[in-house]
Amino acid sequence: MDGFPVNSSGSTKERILGAAELLFAQRGFDGASLRQLTAAAGVNLAAVNYHFGSKEKLVEEVFRRRLDALNESRLVALAKVAGAPDTTLEDVLEAYIRPALELSHDNSGALFMRVLARAFAEHDDSLRQFLSTNYGHVMRQFTAEFARLLPQLSKPELYWRIDLVTGALTHAMSGFGMIQRKGDVSEHAHREQTVQHLVRFAVAGLSHP
Amino acid sequence: MDGFPVNSSGSTKERILGAAELLFAQRGFDGASLRQLTAAAGVNLAAVNYHFGSKEKLVEEVFRRRLDALNESRLVALAKVAGAPDTTLEDVLEAYIRPALELSHDNSGALFMRVLARAFAEHDDSLRQFLSTNYGHVMRQFTAEFARLLPQLSKPELYWRIDLVTGALTHAMSGFGMIQRKGDVSEHAHREQTVQHLVRFAVAGLSHP
DNA sequence: CGTATGCTCAAACGATCGTTTGAACCGGCC
DNA sequence: GGCCGGTTCAAACGATCGTTTGAGCATACG
């Protein structure tokens, strides 16, 4: 069914991670089998268990490889604006949104955002716990800054709005990079335009009266 | 692993549909096996293929049973306000949101919203086509009314915002009914409060300058 | 009563799943 | 050369998947 190996460069581990990203995005974690995956990567079936231990560990490694860099970028961007007296909501939201869209610059990064949106919709407990323990501090720092900039909102009200905005952004980012652009719009301009779209939408959703 | 039959009332078909809703919400379409499903429903394994033909047809029937009623309610509510000169954005959004939260009144309805959110995140082509051909006209009617009430927005801009709002609402509705309420808040009051939350958020996201 | 019909049941089918095994291969080091 | 840790390979393991089968049961109708 799957024809030819898709990836034939890089180390075995990297080929597996790349193919996993593609197939997890297309068919989900259960739907993508290790046989399809290793065939697409051009490696032996046993290589997954040899290098990662199990399929579940491979899933975690797919997340870790991207989220370590993504959340580090977000925290660096947040640190530049957090706590300052003239910081705006736009600044904080850009710190959250822009790194994700820059990750989507290349195809495999865009595929990963699809994987992330899937994990977000699945209320799988083990995966949620993995994400919470490893990257929960990032959302906590952003939430604290939102609370500082929106003092008129009660805590339940703020959490409500953050939850809604996060849902919208995750959905939107999972589609970014998938759609075809007009030929005369550069990748950079398209990304900047999308960042502004999402930031303005998120500002409206967070700060409406 | 799954202990006792969960459902022991109603016809075989209804017991299967109820158990399918629960297990699809918990483990996804691939993750829930027909053996777990029929055991939870308290029916024989072969009953699924006898009554529905295949697992895929069962999935479609789970959607059809709920979405026929849900989208009919939405269209009825929309018809009451669409086209009128004094209709507001709030009215249209309530016509979209309230039927979904009323469906979530009982537990199984709330479970179905989780199933719907899963299908929304999975970019599965066959399922998307099923939803598009059977219920695409509903979203088309709502989109037309949004366009009427927001004439200052270009078409691409409007589609952008509708997509973002839909993502946020789908995510939020999939969580409604799952969370514990304070003991002193009635079900009715909680739902009305949630409707107002979501409507105000959606208005802000659609109509911001 | 006999039979037809709709449904349920235990059992089995072939396919595919994640994982394990043990031999083969490979570079570098004594 | 001889050996050795790291890696790849084909093959097989047991488990579980969706689906099919044919006998068994119940109810209704002549």
Image (spheres, coloured by chain):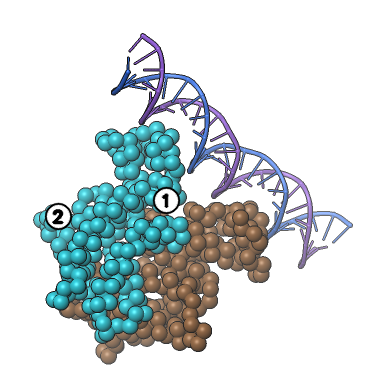
Chain colours: A brown, B cyan, C purple, D blue
Q: At numbered mark 2, what does the secondary structure look like: helix, strand or loop?
A: helix
Query: Which is more toward the observer, A117 or B152?
Result: B152
Q: With respect to residue B107, does A194 lie above or below? A: below
Residue pictured at 34% horizontal, 52% vertical: B63
In this image, A147 relative to D10: left or right?
left
Placement of the N terminus of chain B among the 4 image quadrants = top left
The residue marked by circle 2 belongs to what chain? Answer: B
Q: With respect to residue A185, does B206 lie above or below? A: above
Residue pictured at 60% horizontal, 67% vertical: A14
Q: Amino acid at mark 2?
A: Glu
Residue pictured at 48% horizontal, 72% vertical: A178
Are there few (<14), some (14-19), or many (20+) residues within 10 Å of tag 2? few
Placement of the C terminus of chain B among the 4 image quadrants = bottom left
Q: Which residue is mark 2?
A: B187
The numbered mark, 1 or 2, whose residue comes first in the sequence reads 1
Residue pictured at 24% horizontal, 77% vertical: B148
**Dividing the picture into quarters, in which one does residue A77 lie?**
bottom left
The residue marked by circle 1 belongs to what chain? Answer: B
